[in-house]
Image: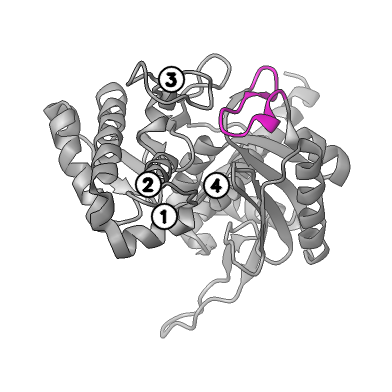
Amino acid sequence: MTLKENRVESTLLRRINERRLLEVIQQQGPSSRAMLTRVSGLTAPTVSKAVDSLLKRGLVEELEPVEQALGRPGRLVRMAAESAAVLGVVIDAQVCCVAAAGLDGKVTEEQTRRFATPDTYSALLDTIEEHCRCLLAGVSGTVHGIGVSVPGLVNERLEEIVFSPNLHLLDKRNPARDLEARLEVHCLLLQETDSLCLSERIYGDARGLHDFAMLDVTTGLGLGVMSGGQLLAGHSGMAGEVGHITVVPDGVRCGCGNRGCLETLATDSALVRLMAEQLGQPLDLEAATALLENRAADFQHELRTVTEYLAIAIAAVINIFNPTTLFVHGTLLAGSEERFARVLERVKQRTLTASLADCTIVATRSSKRQGAIAGIMHHLTNAWAPSIR
């Protein structure tokens, strides 16, 4: 083996070790070098060198530990929260948002900007750019990237949104690529349900889980599946569109152009539509939430309909993918303990008993805002080096 080949292998191994430590710090939070050695399985000298390298590159920071009664505690290492940052952009059918966070992934209302989704693609880009620049101006450290979460079918081979049933102004577009040209900061296009999966795995209750699913039942109905620790993508990255399975052949027209799709009956937007039809007047999510809190008895038929079809959607995911945990992301049903309990009762009658016994169903605490941050952080970790696992 030549000297050059030795150097290449040595550099690659060093980067793999550094990636391993990044993953441990993301999972464990602020950690001493001794803890990193125990958890990572690397030797103490290797950990020390890797931490020093990550410190120089600004990906991690050191902070003083809490005082201990015995001995001299070592300094803690955490993901860079003050000297580095990422941005998350969430594009949705009704409301968009832009958020800034350190590499620790913590998002706050103070660092979040929300706005109604514009009517045209150019206006959307202009508004996102404006809010990004505002947040970037307040970031003191290095900005490592921007995650752009979008609804619809994201074709990874073509690197574009080939079809967005509930926000057609995104069809055949790549807002991440267009924002990158404007802001001169690396931007990554993320399918919103995949981002929710990553958020739950990096920052939520799915830490340490290798096989789980995420069902988003807000505007549309999307599915993200983590299998063997990897996102299930399909041939072009468009797997998971269970919302466009036909359940009522002559039902209402869906944003995809078909009639009777599952997402027209099993989502927050479906319940809002049914409630509006019953009232005979327009209704938005906020107003629907208030009505269900105060006048739920007036909408029992609408609640039963959406509960039944959401149970069908959940049962289908469990029967097909056999996840250890299924996270459900939503507001009107999943966001209410009482209403979600009724959904789970119907799930028991729709799911294969053996498959249901293997699965825990919970309402997720993740948000699309957190998902956009998680998506760009996952990309940065993956880009650092290949995983040895």
Sequence-first tag of 1 and 2: 2
Residue 120 as seen in the image, left or right of residue 227: right
Q: Which residue is mark 3?
A: 259
Along the viewing direction, whichever of 52 and 376 lies nearer the viewer: 376
Q: Label 3 amino acid? A: Arg
Residue that carries the numbered disc 2 in the rendered image:
275
- Which callout, 4 or 1, points at the residue further toward the start of the chain? 1
Question: Residue visible at 51% across and 35% down?
Answer: 194
Q: CB of mark 4 within 8 Å of CB of mark 3? A: no
Number of numbered discs visible in the structure rendering: 4
Q: CA distance from mark 3 to mark 2?
A: 19 Å
Residue 119 highlighted magenta (yes or no): no
Q: Residue 253 has which mark?
A: none
Q: Which residue is mark 4?
A: 371
Q: Is residue 82 left or right of residue 295?
A: right
Boundaries of the magenta span: 156-172
Q: Secondary structure at mark 4?
A: helix
Mark 1 lies on a secondary structure that is: helix
Viewer-nearest of discs 4 and 2: 2
The spot of residue 342 in percent (x, y) is: 19, 47
